[in-house]
Image (cartoon, rainbow, N blue to C red):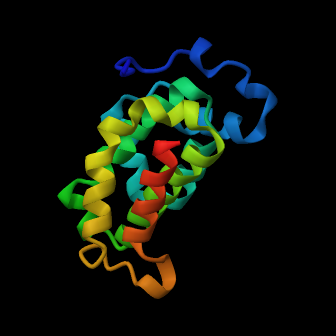
């Protein structure tokens, strides 16, 4: 796996100006390192997840690392949006595996410990199954999609 260690360049963002979602993602994330990007998730995790969903591949592969760090940090549990953070992360991974597997498959080995941690700790994230679904079922679907 080629892990992206450098902040994505303007060139890495490609033709983002032609897509409103990518343009906004660029506005929010461009030039930020992982620590700076991680802070973005604290205030508006649902919105930041949406921006990740539409990013070009290289920025996505870099900034999902910040999201992974955030969602597995003890600090997330003190945030009133902990349940949203965990659910959105799992759903993003599931969606990417389904719709754009080439963008996330190279990262799955690195992401899997976080995915498994979230699945096994749904109660810790105060994520009601009736609202967020069963994280273990999402985990199973992620595993199934990854095997394709």
Q: Nearer the viewer, residue 70 or 132?
A: 132
- Give the residue drawn at x 33%, y 54%: 115
Q: Position of residue 9 (x, y in %)?
A: 52, 15
Is residue 44 in sight in this rendering?
A: no
Q: Quadrant of residue 126?
A: bottom left
Residue lying at 32% horizontally and 65% vertically, measured from the top left: 119
Q: Residue furthest bottom?
A: 130
Residue found at the far right of this picture: 18
**82 or 95: nearer the eye?**
95
Closer to the camera, 20 or 119?
Answer: 119
Looking at the picture, how far across and down is residue 19, in whole percent?
78, 34
Picture quadrant of residue 123: bottom left
Of 71 and 105, nearer the camera is 105
Residue 93 visible (yes or no)? yes
Image mark count: 0
Quarter of the image with the N terminus is top left
Q: In the rendered image of this protein, does residue 144 appear above or below residue 77?
A: above
In the displayed structure, 53 sits above or below 110; it is below
Q: Position of residue 103 (x, y in %)?
A: 55, 32
Question: At which x and y percent is residue 16?
Answer: 71, 27
Residue lying at 46% horizontally and 44% vertically, measured from the top left: 147
Which residue lies most toward the left here?
A: 74
Left-right relation of 25 to 129: right
Say if 141 sits above or below 82 in the image.
above
28 lies left or right of 81? right
Residue extending farthest to the front is: 148
Task: State which quadrant residue 74 falls in.
Answer: bottom left
């Amino acid at each position: 796996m080629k892990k992206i260690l450098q902040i994505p360049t303007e060139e890495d963002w490609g033709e983002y100006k032609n897509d409103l979602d990518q343009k906004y993602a660029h506005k929010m994330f461009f030039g930020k390192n992982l620590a700076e990007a991680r802070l973005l998730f604290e205030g508006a995790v649902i919105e930041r997840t949406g921006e990740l969903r539409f990013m070009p591949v290289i920025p996505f592969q870099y900034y999902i690392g910040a999201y992974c760090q955030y969602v597995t940090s003890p600090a997330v549990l003190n945030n009133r949006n902990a349940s949203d953070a965990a659910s959105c992360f799992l759903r993003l991974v599931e969606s990417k595996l389904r719709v754009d597997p080439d963008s996330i498959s190279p990262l799955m080995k690195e992401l899997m410990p976080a995915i498994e941690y979230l699945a096994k700790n749904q109660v810790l994230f105060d994520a009601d199954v009736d609202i967020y679904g069963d994280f273990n079922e999402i985990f199973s679907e992620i595993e199934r999609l990854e095997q394709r």
